[in-house]
Image (cartoon, rainbow, N blue to C red):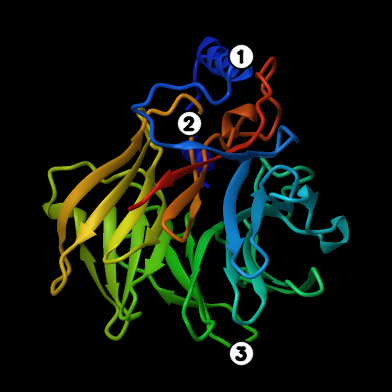
């Protein structure tokens, strides 16, 4: 979701990774606990977000470039979930609300999305789908104010309220349950480039990843923002996806190599970090991992988003080696 942070890799390195996978896609050193959960047959998607419906055991994967949502089940494989008539922009973070049978997604216009125009660039919205009918219910646009916006990720409260981060204009937005309008919720002097976010179990604290600063904690009742990573010697910058799991946070770091999946253990009574544990690092298939989803005691994440397949103007990079979008899974406990 940080299209302006994209780092170009050497074509030779990418080609080697693709060749290694083609020769033996499941044979990697034992030091890598992540394994392939599934792959998508279509290349050139820029796969960014992933959600999971525990009721139907269906995964949903977002595509920035093709401006769509794809569904996957072990039984039926992949199929397009959204329709061209939905007129989505590039799709980013996804979250399933299993209680209300809704799929929420962040839809944002940017050059890497096919058919993007200067007139639409910087527009963004939340999109809500009915999982029963597989139809778009409506979109909730962020009001146009002359500034560029990009809702890149979101999280849901137990009551159905949506919180979403804007990575181009540093705001957290909120769509309250039952409301029809996305409203600005909070900005702060600590905000630079907001990415993933996650609510604590008691929903008193909203944890937010800032790509430059690291990990922040927002006390929702007071809107007080605390920098949790500022007291850490461990580098917690470059966090993209962020997920709450049993008094800890699962985070994907992709700003620089080696790309990592980490667990950030939280103190039980104070807003502080007690330990940082590496769950996965430098996996051979990991070429800019982005977002993920916790399913039971496992973490599924997009390993190779392939932002580098397109330049900053949204044009395909010549001779870029096509790769199947790969979802890896790593055990959490």
Check disc 1: other Cα within 10 Å, few if <14, some if 14-19, many if 20+. few
User: Front-most of 150 and 103?
Assistant: 103
Residue shown at 68%/23% (left/top)? Answer: 322
Q: CA distance from mark 3 to mark 1?
A: 51 Å
Residue shown at 73%/71% (left/top)? Answer: 131
Can the viewer see residue 93 in this picture? no
Percent across and percent down for residue 262 are 31, 45
Which image quadrant for residue 33? top left
Can the viewer see residue 102 in this picture? yes
Which of discs 2 and 3 lies nearer the camera? The answer is 2
Percent across and percent down for residue 41 are 74, 35
Q: Are marks 2 and 1 in contact (CB under 8 Å)?
A: no
Check disc 2: other Cα within 10 Å, few if <14, some if 14-19, many if 20+. many
The residue under label 1 is 23
Which of discs 2 and 1 lies nearer the camera? The answer is 1
The residue under label 3 is 178
Left or right position of 251 against 181: left
3 over 12 or under it: above or below: below
Say which label, 2 or 3, has the lower sequence index.
Answer: 3
Q: CA distance from mark 2 to mark 3?
A: 39 Å
Percent across and percent down for residue 151 are 55, 60
Residue shown at 12%/43% (left/top)? Answer: 233
Left or right position of 22 against 115: left
Residue shown at 22%/41% (left/top)? Answer: 235
Say which label, 3 or 1, has the lower sequence index.
Answer: 1
């Amino acid at each position: 979701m940080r299209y302006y942070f994209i780092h170009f890799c050497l074509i030779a390195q990418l080609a080697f990774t693709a060749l290694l996978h083609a020769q033996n896609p499941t044979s990697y050193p034992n030091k890598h606990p992540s394994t392939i959960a599934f792959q998508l047959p279509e290349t050139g998607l820029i796969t960014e977000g992933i959600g999971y419906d525990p009721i139907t055991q269906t995964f949903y994967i977002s595509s920035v470039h093709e401006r769509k949502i794809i569904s996957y089940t072990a039984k039926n494989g992949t199929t397009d979930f959204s329709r061209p008539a939905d007129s989505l922009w590039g799709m980013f973070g996804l979250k399933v609300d299993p209680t209300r049978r809704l799929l929420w997604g962040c839809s944002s216009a940017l050059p890497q999305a096919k058919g993007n125009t200067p007139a639409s660039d910087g527009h963004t919205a939340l999109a809500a789908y009915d999982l029963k009918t597989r139809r778009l219910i409506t979109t909730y646009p962020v009001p146009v104010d002359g500034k560029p916006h990009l809702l890149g990720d979101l999280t849901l409260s137990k009551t159905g309220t949506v919180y979403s981060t804007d990575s181009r204009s540093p705001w957290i937005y909120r769509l309250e349950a039952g409301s029809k309008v996305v409203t600005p919720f909070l900005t702060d002097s600590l905000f630079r480039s907001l990415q993933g976010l996650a609510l604590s179990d008691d929903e008193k604290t909203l944890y937010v990843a800032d790509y430059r600063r690291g990990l922040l904690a927002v006390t929702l009742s007071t809107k007080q923002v605390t920098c949790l990573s500022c007291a850490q010697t461990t580098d917690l910058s470059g966090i993209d996806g962020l997920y709450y799991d049993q008094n800890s946070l699962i985070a994907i770091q992709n700003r620089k190599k080696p790309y990592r999946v980490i667990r950030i253990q939280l103190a039980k009574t104070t807003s502080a970090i007690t330990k940082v544990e590496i769950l996965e690092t430098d996996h051979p298939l990991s070429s800019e991992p982005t977002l993920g989803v916790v399913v039971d005691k496992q973490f599924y994440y997009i390993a190779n988003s392939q932002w580098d397949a397109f330049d900053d103007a949204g044009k395909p990079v010549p001779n870029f080696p096509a790769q199947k979008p790969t979802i890896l899974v790593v055990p959490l406990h």
